Every structure is written in C-alpha cells, then in structure tokens.
Image: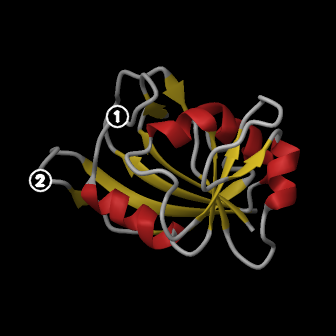
Amino acid sequence: MISIIVAIAQNQAIGKNNDLLWHLSADLKHFKELTSGNTVIMGKRTFFSLPVHPLPKRRNIVITDIPDEKIEGCEMAYSIDGAIKLCNPEETNYIIGGGSIYKQFLPFADKLEITWVYKDFDADTFFPIIDENEWKVAAQSEKMHDEKTGLDFAFFTYTRR
C-alpha cells in the first residue's frame, strides 16, 4: 500500500523555503505513530530538511536524480518507478514529500493521511487539489486546537473511490 502523509493549509500550502509552515506537536506525534515501523519515501531535499535523518525506526528511501548517489542509512531510488519497486507490499509505504514527490506519487497512492490546518499560509509549495471524484473521506478526527501556535486542525484519512 502507498499512502501519502502530509499537512495542508486550507489554501493547499505545504511549505516554504524547504521547510514546514508550522510545527504542531500533535501532528508530529500522529506522523510518528503512523510511519514508525514502516517505509518512508521522500525526495532528497525533504530528507536533508528533517531534524533527524534518517528517520529512526523506519526504512528510509530517498529519491534522487543523481545516478549512483548514496546517503548513509538510506536506500536510494533514482526515479518514481524505482521507488515503487522498492516498496514493501507487506506494509504501508508512506510518501512524506516534498511537493513534486507528492504530485508524482498521487496517481499511485491508495490512501491519503491529511492533517488539514484551518488557515491560509504564504508558501512556495502546494499540494494538488484532492479530487472528490477520486477520493472519499474514510475517517476524520474532531477539530483540535494547538495552544502554542493558535492553529486549528484535524486529521483526515482518504481512500480511493
């Protein structure tokens, strides 16, 4: 199974200057709970933007277009197809960014794990519009409020129709 996991602002914003737009401790905990023990797949810029890399207790696959590039502690893929071939069919393989990686994996995804943040943000990276003809909400949390940031958010799981 291929699952995209991402936090999205209400204006589809997901990042700026290769960084997250917010830090919600509940969202980071949710990310860790879902991805731990599974495979995470990301582009190289996302990998190097992580506070800890490779992500512990996860199989890390990094996509790069530089032939034969190696990153310690990671498996390397040199294309989207190459990354898909490395996916473990016995587990959930989480796509964790960045923007172009999300767009390229969207046609292959079985599930979307979205944290919707109920605010618009100034950004340079956006997630594609989720087509309601292709995706349906399978589960959602109650709206939550983060005291530290003042942001409201909720967790949604989408599955293909």
Task: Answer with mark 1 or mark 2, whichever residue precedes in sequence.
Answer: 1
The x and y percentages for residue 14 are 46, 35
Within-10-Å neighbours for mark 1: few <14, some 14–19, many 20+: some
Q: Are marks 1 and 2 in contact (CB under 8 Å)?
A: no
Secondary structure category for the residue under label 1: loop
- Residue 160, given in percent of the width and then of the height, sits at 74, 61
Q: Which residue is mark 1?
A: 21
Q: Is 87 in front, or is 2? A: 87
- Callout 2 amino acid: Glu
Which numbered disc, 1 or 2, marks the residue closer to the eye? 1
Disc 2 element: loop
Residue farthest to the bottom, as pictured: 90
Tell me which amino acid carries mark 1. Leu
Q: Is residue 128 visible?
A: no
Q: Which residue is mark 2?
A: 147
* Mark linked to residue 32: none
Q: Residue at x 58, y 37 (%)?
A: 98
Give the image location of residue 58, x and y in percent.
56, 67
Residue 37 vertical placement versus 22 (above, below): below
Q: To which quarter of the image does residue 37 belong?
A: bottom right
150 or 54: which is nearer to us?
54
